Image: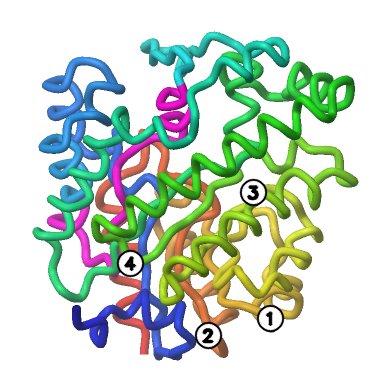
Amino acid sequence: MNYNNKKLLKTLQGHKFNTPPVWLMRQAGRYLPEYREVRKQAGSFLDLCYNPTLTTEVTLQPLRRFNLDGAILFADILLIPNALGQHLEFKEGIGPILEPLKNNEDIENLRNTEDIHSTLEPVYEAVTNIRSKLETNITFIGFAGSPWTVATYMIEGKGSKDHIKTKTFMLNYPQVFKKLIVKIQDATIEYLSKQIEAGVDVIKLFDSWANSLPAIYIEKYSLEPMKVIAKEIKKRFPNIPVIVFPRGIGPMYKKFAMVKEFDCVAVDSSIDLDWAKKNIQKEIVIQGNLDPAYLISGGKELVEGTLNIVNKFSSSGHIFNLGHGITPDAKIHNVELLLKTIKEKN
């Protein structure tokens, strides 16, 4: 396959461009009316994730509207626990609900890693479909959740703001917790490997709840498991870049930037740009980091905020993105303004 015109992929490989490639976390989502139509058609959110035809459609929707350099597979980080045998459903207005893991027996009862693919086969089929329909200049991004973030949902049984149950489990039963982390880690390697075989160009690991870890555990339970995954992926697929996003960890981002198995560190909107340029971008390609609120407010603040990031990171490898995912109340005309501002910058 010819990668020469894939601007995003080439940036990850060390090439420098006058303006950065751009894609947006949650670029396929509820702010798009066409997504909401497909979501209604699918029934449940999980049915949407496991329907290759509809998954293909929603993945491609933002590319029809916007001048983006990347497509990201439409899926959910909780497909891994579901494939491991944990009951999962999504309730309107509440979010994901899982049967929480309470002890070692619950973890022992999870499926073997090699048995996850029968559940996840529709995802791999969707990847193949999407790959066949993408323009040749679009970089295709596959993804998974980090072991820490996925573990929080598996133990809490739902989303949480403080993850007290998970941290208590981690502290009280460290060996059992480590067993769960390794289980998720190994399943994630297999899952991402299948995504790559089906056609993605890049993988991204989302550690959305890294900031809820005590600082002394960030390296052990956020960085190290993602490093193991990246190292194995690089062993199997040497040319596949890896992006990591340990959200909200402040100065600890610097440790991630030093890991040779990572090709890019995505940063959240709270990070000072000068600090990020000096401590992260000096070591590795940086991705980010406009606050999603700008896509609601728009106007000159959006333009100025966008140009500030582009200008600050223009001297080295940079992929423009948000500091977190697009919110459902983002305005389509503001996404258009964001992209116009980047693409037309001299």
Q: Can you identify the residue that label 2 sits on?
A: 314
Q: Where is residue 21 in the image (x, y as percent from the top left)?
A: 37, 74
Q: Can you identify the residue that label 1 sits on?
A: 283
Q: Which of marks 2 and 1 is nearer the N terminus?
A: 1
Q: Which of marks 4 and 1 is nearer the N terminus?
A: 4
Q: Where is residue 117 in the image (x, y as percent from the top left)?
A: 33, 35
Badge 1, how many Cα within 10 Å: few under 14, some, many 20+? many
Q: Can you identify the residue that label 4 sits on?
A: 201
Q: What element carries label 3?
A: loop
Q: Earlier in the sequence, mark 2 or mark 3?
A: 3
Residue 131 vs residue 84: left or right? left
Using the numbered discs, state the Cα–Cα distance from disc 2 to disc 3 in whole angstroms: 22 Å
Q: What stretch is highlighted in magenta?
A: 62-84
Using the numbered discs, state the Cα–Cα distance from disc 4 to disc 2 in whole angstroms: 24 Å
User: What amino acid is at disc 2?
Assistant: Ser
Using the numbered discs, state the Cα–Cα distance from disc 4 to disc 1 in whole angstroms: 22 Å
* Tags 2 and 1 touching, CB below 8 Å: no
Q: Nearer the viewer, residue 233 or 114?
A: 114
Whether 83 is among the magenta residues is yes
User: What amino acid is at disc 1?
Assistant: Glu
Q: Give the number of the disc on residue 247.
A: 3
* Tags 4 and 2 touching, CB below 8 Å: no
* Tags 1 and 3 touching, CB below 8 Å: no
Image quadrant holding the C terminus, namely: bottom left
User: What amino acid is at disc 3?
Assistant: Arg
Image quadrant holding the N terminus, namely: bottom left
Q: Which residue is drawn at 60% across and 11% down?
A: 100
Q: Where is residue 272 in the image (x, y as percent from the top left)?
A: 72, 65
Using the numbered discs, state the Cα–Cα distance from disc 2 to disc 1 in whole angstroms: 15 Å
Whether residue 293 appears in this view of the structure is no
Q: Is residue 238 above or below residue 125?
A: below
Using the numbered discs, state the Cα–Cα distance from disc 4 to disc 3 in whole angstroms: 23 Å
